[in-house]
Image: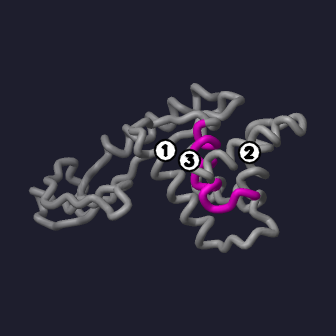
C-alpha cells in the first residue's frame, strides 16, 4: 500500500472504530461512560461503559497508535519488538540480558510517545535508541551507532569514541 493510502486507511480505521462503538449486548449505538482509568504505562485508557437501553455494563480498552514514517515514505505502526531485535544484533556477545533489552525498548517507546506526536520519522526512532543504549553498554552503542550513523572510516569511529570518553568523564 502506498504511504498516503496506508495513512488514510489507518485514520479511517480508527474513525470507523469510534463511529461503531455500540453495546455488545443489544447493539445500541448510545453508551455512557461510567468510569475511566489510565493504564500504568499511560498508553491506554480503560473505560467502563453502561448501555442506557439494556442497562448492561461492559469495558473498552482504547490505545493510541504511534506510526513510524520510513525513509521510503511507507508508514507502519511502531513495533517495540523491532527496536529490541535491532539492538539485540548490536549486543551480540555482550553481557546484556533479555530483560535489559526489553527495558531499553520500553524506554524508547516512552520517549517517542512522550513527544505527543502520532507519527515519528524512522531516524527519530534511531536517535531515541542511542542514549539508553549508550547507558546500557558502550560497545553495543558503538556497533549500533556505526550502522545507524553510517560510519565510513576510522575517523568517524574515533570521533564517536572521543565523544563517549568526554561524556563518561563528566
- Please identify the quadrant where the N terminus is shown: top right
Q: Which residues are magenta?
A: 124-139
Q: Is residue 30 above or below residue 55?
A: above
Q: Is residue 153 left or right of residue 52?
A: right
The residue mark sitting in front, 1 or 3, is: 1
The residue that label 2 is drawn on is 145
The residue mark sitting in front, 2 or 1, is: 2
Residue 93 place in picture, x, y as percent: 81, 69
Residue 25 place in picture, x, y as percent: 24, 64
Proximity of marks 2 and 1: CB atoms separated by less than 8 Å: no
Q: Is residue 76 above or below residue 97?
A: above
Looking at this rendering, what residue extends furthest in the top direction?
4
* Marks 2/3: CA–CA distance: 20 Å
Secondary structure beneath dot 2 equals: helix
Q: Is residue 151 left or right of residue 102?
A: right
Secondary structure beneath dot 3 equals: loop
Q: Is residue 136 left or right of residue 55?
A: right
Secondary structure beneath dot 1 equals: helix
Q: Does 51 appear in magenta?
A: no
* Marks 1/3: CA–CA distance: 10 Å
Residue in the picture at 30% in, 56% down = 45
Proximity of marks 1 and 3: CB atoms separated by less than 8 Å: yes
Binning the other alpha carbons within 10 Å of mark 3 as few (below 14), some (14 to 19) or many (20 upward) gives some
The residue that label 3 is drawn on is 78
Residue in the picture at 79% in, 44% down = 146
The residue that label 1 is drawn on is 112
Whichever of callouts 2 and 1 sits on the residue coming sooner in the sequence is 1
Proximity of marks 2 and 3: CB atoms separated by less than 8 Å: no
Q: Nearer the viewer, residue 29 or 3?
A: 3
Give the numbered dot on residue 80.
Answer: none
Residue in the picture at 60% in, 68% down = 100
Amino acid at each position: 500500500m502506498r504511504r498516503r493510502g496506508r495513512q488514510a486507511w489507518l485514520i479511517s480505521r480508527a474513525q470507523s472504530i469510534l463511529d461503531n462503538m455500540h453495546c455488545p449486548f443489544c447493539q445500541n449505538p448510545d453508551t455512557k461512560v461510567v468510569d475511566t482509568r489510565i493504564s500504568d504505562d499511560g498508553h491506554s485508557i480503560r473505560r467502563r461503559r453502561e448501555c442506557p437501553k439494556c442497562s448492561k455494563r461492559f469495558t473498552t480498552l482504547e490505545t493510541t497508535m504511534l506510526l513510524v514514517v520510513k525513509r521510503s515514505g511507507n508508514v507502519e505502526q511502531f513495533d517495540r519488538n523491532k527496536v529490541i531485535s535491532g539492538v539485540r544484533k548490536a549486543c551480540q556477545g555482550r553481557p546484556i540480558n533479555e530483560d535489559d533489552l526489553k527495558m531499553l525498548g520500553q524506554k524508547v517507546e516512552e520517549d517517542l510517545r512522550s513527544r505527543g506526536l502520532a507519527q515519528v520519522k524512522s531516524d527519530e526512532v534511531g536517535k531515541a535508541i542511542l542514549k539508553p543504549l549508550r547507558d546500557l553498554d558502550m560497545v553495543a552503542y558503538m556497533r549500533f551507532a556505526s550502522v545507524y550513523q553510517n560510519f565510513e572510516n576510522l575517523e568517524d569511529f574515533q570521533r564517536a569514541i572521543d565523544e563517549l570518553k568526554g561524556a563518561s568523564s563528566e
